[in-house]
Image: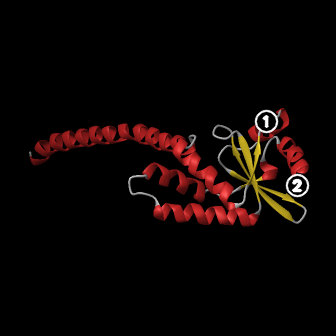
């Protein structure tokens, strides 16, 4: 008699547990979508205030600006990943490239020293940034946290290489 009274209760608890688990699993797709959305936002084009400051820091650090005002330079600029550093090795020299297709429509070209100066300036500006300037902080942190891409991994590296040989 005791078993007959507790067994239906066990079934109802099991059903309640199953329903609870299904509800919990219902949050998994939402969580995955949220994580993917945050990754897309991280890869999104940086804001104009960030781009203004970033262009200033790149120039101040010693990067040379190559404006994409002819077809070959435009092709090179679009072959590079936007808003990411690319390392190009040329003999014993190493150049850092940074494509800016929307703000200045240019490629920043610099040495390892210029790159180190830039990183120092950008990380120093994070400490001096206003507490309310969280968007700038996030975009600068994202840029500092990504390692430069190797030039040889770029699909259309010949377009960029042609421009670099002219400007070395």
Q: Is label 2 or label 1 in front?
A: 1
In this picture, residue 105 sits left or right of residue 130: right
At a point 77% along the width and 62% down the height, the residue shown is: 111
Estimate the x, y position of residue 8 in percent, counting from the top left.
Answer: 16, 39
State the SS at label 2.
Answer: loop
What scheme was used to colour the molecule? Answer: secondary structure
**At 46% from the left edge and 48% from the top edge, which residue is drawn?**
135
Instruction: Give the left or right position of residue 125, taking residue 88 as reference.
Output: left
Residue 31 placement (x, y as % from top left) = 41, 42
- Residue ID at (50%, 61%): 126
Residues tagged 2 and 1 counted as in contact (Cβ below 8 A): no
Circle 1 residues within 10 Å: few <14, some 14–19, many ≥20: few
Q: Is residue 151 left or right of residue 4?
A: right
Q: How many marks?
A: 2
User: What quarter of the picture does the N terminus occupy?
Assistant: top left
Up the image or down, 146 lies above or below 28; here it is below
Q: Farthest residue to the left: give it.
A: 1
Say which mark, if any, is on residue 168: 2
Residue at the (74%, 38%) spot, across then down: 78
- Dot 2 crowding, Cα within 10 Å, few <14, some 14–19, many 20+: few
Vertical comparison of 107 with 87: above or below: above
First in sequence: mark 2 or mark 1? Answer: 1
Q: Quadrant of residue 58?
A: bottom right
Residue 141 image offset from top left, x and y in percent: 53, 57
Q: Nearer the viewer, residue 153 or 29?
A: 153
Report which residue position mark 1 lands on.
Answer: 69
Q: Which residue is nearer to you in this view: 59 or 165? A: 59
- Above or below, 114 against 8 in this view is below
Where residue 89 is drawn, which disc sits there? none
Distance of mark 2 from mark 1, alpha carbons? 18 Å
Q: Secondary structure at mark 1?
A: loop
């Amino acid at each position: 008699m005791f078993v007959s009274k507790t067994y239906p209760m066990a079934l109802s608890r099991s059903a309640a547990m199953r329903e609870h688990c299904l509800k919990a699993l219902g949050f998994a797709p939402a969580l995955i979508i949220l994580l993917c959305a945050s990754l897309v936002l991280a890869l999104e084009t940086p804001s104009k205030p960030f781009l203004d400051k970033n262009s200033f820091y790149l120039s101040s650090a010693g990067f040379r600006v190559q404006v994409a005002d002819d077809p070959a330079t435009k092709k090179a600029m679009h072959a590079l990943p936007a808003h990411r550093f690319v390392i190009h090795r040329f003999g014993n020299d190493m150049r850092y490239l940074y494509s800016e297709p929307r703000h200045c429509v240019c490629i920043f070209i610099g040495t390892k020293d210029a790159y180190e100066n830039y990183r120092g300036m950008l990380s120093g500006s994070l400490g001096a940034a206003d507490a309310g300037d969280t968007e700038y902080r996030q975009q600068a942190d994202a840029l500092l946290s990504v390692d430069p891409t190797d030039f040889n991994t770029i699909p259309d590296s010949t377009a960029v290489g042609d421009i670099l040989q002219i400007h070395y």
